Amino acid sequence: MDIFKRKNRIYVPVITEEIAKETLIRCSSCGRLISYKDLKNNLNVCLYCGHHFRMSIQERINLLTDTDTFKAINSDIEPLDVLNFYDGAYYKNQLAKVRQETGLNSALITGKAKIDGVDVAIGAFSFEFIGGSLGFTEGEKIVKLFTYAKKNQLPVVVKFSSGGERIQEGVFSMLQIVRIIQAVDEFREIGGLFISLLTNPVYGGASAIGMLGQFVFAEKDTMIGLTSPRITQLAFGMNFSRELQSAEKLLENGFLDGVFERKDLKSTISKVLKIYTNRSLI
Amino acid sequence: MMTLLSFERELAPLYKELEGKTGLEKKELKNVIEERLKVIYKSLTPYNIVEVARHPDRPQTLDYIKELLTNFVEIKGDRISGEDRSIIAGIGKFNGLSLTVIGSNKGHTIIERLKSNSGMIGPSGFRKIARAVDIASNTFKTPILTFIDTPGARVSPETEKEGSVAALSEPIKAFLRAKVPVLSVVIGEGGSLGALSLLVSDRILMLSYSYLSVISPEVGASVLFKDRSMKKDIAKASKITSEELLSFNVINGIIEEPFTGAHRNPELTIQTVKEALQKEFELLLKEPSGNLLKRRVEKFEKFKI
């Protein structure tokens, strides 16, 4: 329940084609200038310090799946404004705007694809869509993804980047977590494999779901926790170090199976998938 | 003197005056205050209700346990990392019925609040809930009653290190498997993931001045506006009151508090809750528990598009 911003306060540059094509980008971590082209060629990772910048949802799909194998499912499910939420602006209007800007119907795209030749059911959160937050549509799509995977006996890979529950959908967004936990549980019960990939950031209820995989991997430079240090500071006046919520720290504390650089994510996931699909059942 | 809430402050002089009065005069002044309060409470805003829900004199989980249960034996610790006093769990008898009770407890005094982290649940608390549910479902086979009164999950360096993110789903999973009737009552604050950890039940009741929300109004305002002071707008927009949630069919019923708030008459409140619980358990116990579990899962599946 975090991070999505009204007045674009930005930690890392959001790179849009028009603005950035001809410009140099300053790395928010080491401060050096990098050309847009070099950054794109290097998977949005700083050439000097290795800082991982955010990726668009399309770049993510390209990174994780085999070329042209991704087929979206349930992409026509429309978002809903049950509460008629108004906090000075209408959520309805915000939804319309973000749908137009991103071309997405929700913060989660789901589908089937191949990863190094292995068929998978895959989901990916888009942080650009209201902070990747979790509402009705996202809940429905995750549940449907796991049902689809169960029916077709496919492993599931979900890439998380989410601020948590969608505040604008109130208690209904929170109740999605219960549905999702049930769906994952039923899937795991029949021996389904769920690989969870956490990318910056994963907060609130999304972190609880992200931890449900048998394998939980995180990308370098990912923050994972209940509430971000910034919100904790704003809301409770309490300070704690950002480092505590770093993927590296969670790995050390026993909550992750690995933290990898962007370039190694696909090959790591693919190793697990291949062992899983090629095993002789006992 | 009783702690007055922001919207009751206009009555402070009257309360002060009351202290010096005796006999008939005192009674008359009390009536005047009562009438004024009734007018005020007729038009509470959602954020006012949040304030009532947070009143330190409101009856809490431990008060209900003390008044309603006999032979209470506590379930303590999560057997992994510690004992979280924000969660009180145990077995006991309610009107002759064996029960397992699990509730979040805030504490009335500062010392109590420090011990219970003001009811904010950490990883060991989440695991303790799951352990108590397991004992209720598999060993004692008793119905489970949950009391919800928490500002939310605890956020601190310790809880992040101990892994709230991993522990959060444990109680939800446990309730989704419990083969016994589960009844939830929101008695005060129903804050975010803390409340969710005690909410996966067959029937949900709310006290009239309690609230249930995905996020506390202060945190919501910080996220959406970077400004805590927008909390009133968030409380209104998020539809967090018992009446609103009943209209959305998220909850099954409202337990009416004394008109001017549970904190003004805790005894009467607890008595009203007792009567409501009796009725609910009569209904729940008629149902074969296999049906209940199936329907519980279906109910949460229904919160979709």
Image (spheres, coloured by chain):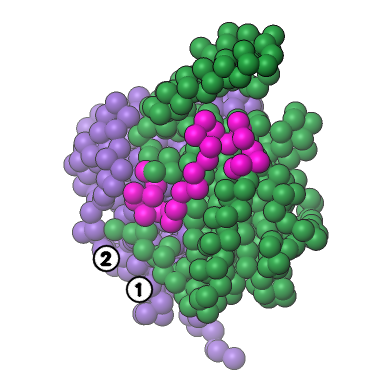
Q: Nearer the viewer, residue A241 or A135?
A: A135
From the viewer's perspective, is B243 left or right of B282? left
B254 magenta-colored: yes
B286 magenta-colored: no
Residue B152 can be seen in this image: no
Where in the figure is residue B223, as x and y percent of width and height?
Answer: 45, 31
Q: Which amino acid does label 1 sit on?
A: Tyr
Q: Which residue lies furthest to the bottom in this view?
A: A282
Residue drawn at point x = 50 percent, y = 38 percent:
B209
Magenta stretch in the rendered image: B244-269
Evaluate if marks 1 and 2 touch, with contact meaning CB atoms under 8 Å apart: yes
Discs 1, 2: same chain: yes
Q: Mark 2 lies on which chain?
A: A
Q: Mark 1 Cα within 10 Å, few/some/many (few <14, many 20+)? A: some
Q: Which chain is green?
A: B
From the viewer's perspective, is A270 left or right of B57? left
Dot 2 falls on a residue whose secondary structure is strand
Where in the figure is residue B152, as x and y percent of width and height?
Answer: 58, 41
Q: Which chain is purple?
A: A
Numbered label attached to residue A128 = none
Q: Which chain carries label 1?
A: A
Residue drawn at point x = 61 percent, y = 53 percent:
B274
Q: What residue sits right under mark 2 in the picture?
A: A73
Residue B175 can be seen in this image: yes
Where in the figure is residue B246, as x and y percent of width and height?
Answer: 38, 50
Q: What residue type is labelled 2?
A: Ile
Q: What residue sits right under mark 1 in the picture?
A: A148
Residue drawn at point x = 44 percent, y = 23 percent:
B40
